[in-house]
C-alpha cells in the first residue's frame, strides 16, 4: 500500500496530543492517589487504635470492678465471720445482685486450706499452699490468674485478694464466669472480619476467637507481643499463605494479658480499595477521552491539511492556466496587430484597383459588361471581407488593451450589438439563438468600452458554456435585454436557459479561482474580475438562477 505523505504528520500530532495532556493527567492522578491512600491508611489505623483503646478500657473497668467487689467484702468482714458457710452464702448472694460475673466464692487461711466455699463444686478442705496463684496472692495482695482448668477441669480464671488480720494473712477468692467474660471481650464488631481476643504472656488464648482458635489454645500465627507499657501497636502480619491481617495490640493494666484486635487487611482497607477502583475508573475514562479526542482532532487536522494542500495544488494549476491564457491573449493581440498591416496594404491596393478600373472604363480600355461586373463584385466581396477582418482584429486589440481604464461616454444600444457580434458565430455553431432587446432611444453611460466588453463577453461565454452543458446543440437561448431605470440607471440582463447554479455554488461564483469547469477550460477568474470592473464603474452585479432552468446576470450601471 502506498504510504500517505501525511502519515508522519499524523503520527507526530497524535503522539503530542496524547502525551501532552497525559503527563499532567497522570501526575495529578499519581499525587491524588498517593495522598488519598495515605490519608485513608492513616485514618484506618487511627480508628483501629481508637477501638483497641476503648475496648481495653472496658475490659480493665470490668476487672477492676470485680477486684473492688472482693476488696469491699474483705475489708468489711472478718475471717471468722466469712468462714461461716451461711455468712459466705449470704455475701455471695448479695454479690450476685451487683454482678452475675462470679461463679463461686472461697476463703483460704494462711496455710492454703480452702476453709470455706460457696459455689457449684465441692472444693472445701482442699489444699492450695503450693499453687502459684496462692503464692502470688500472698506476695502481691491481689492476683488475677490466667485461664486454667484447676480441680474442676473446666476453663476459668480467678481473682484473689489477701488481707492481713491479727498477724495472719487470709485470702478471698472468686471464680469469674469465663463464658461471660469471653462474650464481653469478643463482642466487638469491625467490618466483616474484625475480632478481639486476649493472649497471655506465653501467647495462649484467654478467650475464644471468632476466626478459629479456642480458649487455652495457642493460635497458629505468631505475632510479636508489644513491649510493656500502655502504647497501642499496629502492624500488618501475614501467616504463610493466609490473608494478611491488620493488628492492634496492647497490654491490659496488670500486664498479664494482651488485648489483640485484628481485621483482614483487605477488609480494613476496603475504603482504600474503593478509592483505588475509583481512581482506576477515572484513569480509564479520562485516558480514553484523551485518546479519543487526540484521534478525532488529529483526523480533523490532517483532513484540513489535505484539503488545504489539494486547494493549493488546484490553485496553482489554475494560476498556470490563467497565465497561459494571458500569454495567449498577448499573442493574439500581437497577431492582430501583425495582420492589420497586410490588411491595410490589401485595402490600399484594392482602392488602387478600383481607381484603375474606373479610369480604364472612362478611357474605354474596359467595356462595361458581364465580366467587368463580376470583377467589381469580387472586389466588393474582398473589400467586405477585409473590413470584417479589420473589425475582428480591431476588437481583439481593443479587448487586449491594457493599462488605466479610460472612461468615455458610450451608447449601450451601439456597444451591445458589437459585442454580440463577437460571439454570434460561436452561438450559431452550437444552435443557440441570441435574442437582443434594446430600447429605440440611446442609453448612455460613462464607462471604459473595452472593460464593458470584457464583462459582457465573459457573461455571454459563461451562458454559452452552461447552455452547451445542459442542452448540447439544440434549443439554447441567450437573452440580452437593455432597459433604463427611474434615475437614469441602465440595466443589462444576460439570461440563458443553461444548467443554472446550485445554491451552495451561488455563494462562491464571485470568488477568485472558483470554477466548476474542467481543468484547462475554466480559470474561475472571469466573474471575480467582472465583479471588480462593474464595481469600479460604480455599478452592481446581481445573479438569479434556478438549477436546470437557467441563469440571469444583471448589471446595473449608473447613468
Ligand atoms: P470560469 O468560467 O472560468 O469557470 P467564472 O468566474 O466566469 O469562471 O465562473 C465561475 C463559475 O460560475 C463557473 O465555473 C460556473 O460554475 C458558474 N457560472 C457562471 N456563469 C454561469 C451561468 N450562466 N450558468 C451556470 N453557471 C454559471
Image (cartoon, rainbow, N blue to C red):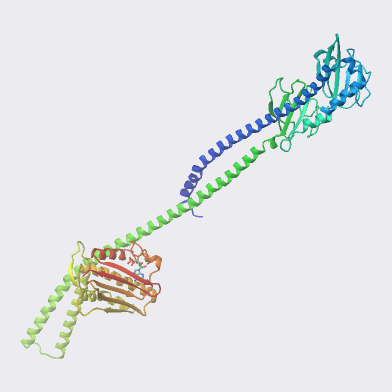
Residue closer to the observer: 552 or 96: 96
Work out which residue is located at the far left of the displayed protein and give it. Answer: 363
Residue 7 position, x and y percent, is: 48, 50
Q: Quadrant of the C terminus?
A: bottom left
Work out which residue is located at the far bottom of the displayed protein and give it. Answer: 369
- Residue beneath the point at 63% across and 42% down: 277
In the image, taking residue 50 as reference, residue 5 lies left or right, namely left
Number of labels in the image equals: 0
Res. 177 visible in picture: no
In the displayed structure, 14 sits above or below 79; it is below
Residue 402 position, x and y percent, is: 21, 63
Res. 276 visible in picture: yes
In the image, taking residue 184 as reference, residue 471 lies left or right, namely left
Give the image quarter of residue 358. Answer: bottom left
Residue 511 position, x and y percent, is: 34, 62
Give the image quarter of residue 540. Answer: bottom left
Q: Quadrant of ligand 1?
A: bottom left
- Residue beneath the point at 47% across and 46% down: 12
In the displayed structure, 117 sits above or below 421; it is above
- Residue beneath the point at 61% across and 43% down: 278
Residue closer to the observer: 250 or 549: 250
Give the image quarter of residue 493. Answer: bottom left
In the image, taking residue 450 as reference, residue 157 lies left or right, namely right
Residue 403 position, x and y percent, is: 20, 61
Residue closer to the observer: 300 or 537: 537
Amino acid at each position: 500500500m502506498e504510504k500517505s505523505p501525511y502519515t508522519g504528520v499524523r503520527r507526530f500530532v497524535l503522539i503530542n496530543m496524547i502525551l501532552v495532556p497525559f503527563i499532567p493527567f497522570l501526575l495529578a492522578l499519581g499525587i491524588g492517589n498517593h495522598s488519598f491512600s495515605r490519608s485513608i491508611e492513616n485514618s484506618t489505623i487511627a480508628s483501629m487504635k481508637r477501638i483497641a483503646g476503648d475496648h481495653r478500657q472496658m475490659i480493665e473497668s470490668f476487672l477492676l470492678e470485680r477486684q473492688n467487689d472482693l476488696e469491699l467484702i474483705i475489708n468489711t468482714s472478718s475471717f471468722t465471720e466469712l468462714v461461716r458457710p451461711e455468712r459466705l452464702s449470704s455475701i455471695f448472694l448479695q454479690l450476685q445482685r451487683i454482678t452475675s460475673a462470679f461463679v463461686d466464692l472461697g476463703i483460704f487461711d494462711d496455710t492454703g486450706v480452702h476453709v470455706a466455699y460457696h459455689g457449684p463444686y465441692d472444693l472445701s478442705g482442699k489444699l492450695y499452699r503450693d499453687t502459684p496463684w496462692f503464692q502470688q496472692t500472698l506476695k502481691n495482695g491481689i492476683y488475677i490468674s490466667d485461664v486454667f482448668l484447676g480441680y474442676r477441669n473446666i476453663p476459668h480464671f480467678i481473682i484473689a485478694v489477701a488481707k492481713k488480720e491479727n498477724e495472719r494473712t487470709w485470702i478471698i477468692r472468686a471464680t469469674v464466669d469465663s463464658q461471660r467474660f469471653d462474650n464481653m471481650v469478643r463482642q466487638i464488631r469491625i467490618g466483616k472480619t474484625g475480632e478481639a481476643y486476649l493472649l497471655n504472656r506465653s501467647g495462649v488464648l484467654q478467650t475464644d476467637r471468632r476466626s478459629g482458635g479456642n480458649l487455652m489454645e495457642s493460635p497458629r500465627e505468631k505475632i510479636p507481643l508489644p513491649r510493656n507499657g500502655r502504647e497501642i501497636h499496629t502492624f500488618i502480619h501475614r501467616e504463610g499463605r493466609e490473608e494478611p491481617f491488620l493488628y492492634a495490640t496492647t497490654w491490659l493494666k496488670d500486664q498479664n494479658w494482651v488485648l489483640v484486635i485484628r481485621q483482614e487487611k483487605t477488609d480494613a482497607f476496603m475504603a482504600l480499595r474503593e478509592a483505588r477502583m475509583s481512581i482506576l475508573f477515572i484513569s480509564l475514562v479520562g485516558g480514553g477521552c484523551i485518546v479519543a479526542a487526540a484521534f478525532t482532532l488529529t483526523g480533523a487536522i490532517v483532513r484540513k491539511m489535505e484539503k488545504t494542500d489539494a486547494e493549493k495544488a488546484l490553485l496553482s494549476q489554475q494560476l498556470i492556466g490563467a497565465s497561459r491564457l494571458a500569454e495567449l491573449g498577448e499573442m493574439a493581440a500581437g497577431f492582430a496587430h501583425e495582420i492589420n498591416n497586410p490588411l491595410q496594404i490589401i485595402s490600399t491596393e484594392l482602392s488602387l484597383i478600383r481607381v484603375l478600373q474606373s479610369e480604364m472604363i472612362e478611357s474605354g480600355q474596359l467595356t462595361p459588361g458581364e465580366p467587368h461586373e463580376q470583377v467589381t463584385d469580387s472586389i466588393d466581396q474582398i473589400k467586405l471581407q477585409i473590413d470584417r477582418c479589420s473589425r475582428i482584429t480591431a476588437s481583439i486589440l481593443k479587448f487586449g488593451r491594457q493599462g488605466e481604464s479610460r472612461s468615455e461616454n458610450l451608447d449601450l444600444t451601439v456597444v451591445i450589438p458589437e459585442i454580440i457580434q463577437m460571439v454570434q458565430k460561436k452561438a450559431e455553431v452550437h444552435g443557440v439563438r441570441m435574442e437582443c432587446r434594446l430600447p429605440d432611444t440611446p442609453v448612455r453611460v460613462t464607462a471604459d468600452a473595452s472593460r464593458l466588453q470584457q464583462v459582457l463577453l465573459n457573461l455571454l461565454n459563461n451562458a454559452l458554456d452552461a447552455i452547451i452543458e445542459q442542452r448540447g446543440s439544440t434549443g439554447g437561448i441567450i437573452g440580452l435585454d437593455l432597459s433604463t431605470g427611474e434615475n437614469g440607471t441602465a440595466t443589462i440582463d444576460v439570461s440563458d436557459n443553461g444548467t443554472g447554479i446550485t445554491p451552495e455554488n451561488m455563494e462562491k461564483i464571485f470568488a477568485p479561482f472558483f470554477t466548476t469547469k474542467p481543468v484547462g477550460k475554466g480559470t474561475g477568474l472571469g466573474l471575480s474580475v467582472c465583479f471588480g470592473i462593474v464595481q469600479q464603474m460604480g455599478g452592481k452585479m446581481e445573479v438569479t438562477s434556478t438549477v436546470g432552468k437557467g441563469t440571469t446576470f444583471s448589471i446595473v450601471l449608473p447613468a
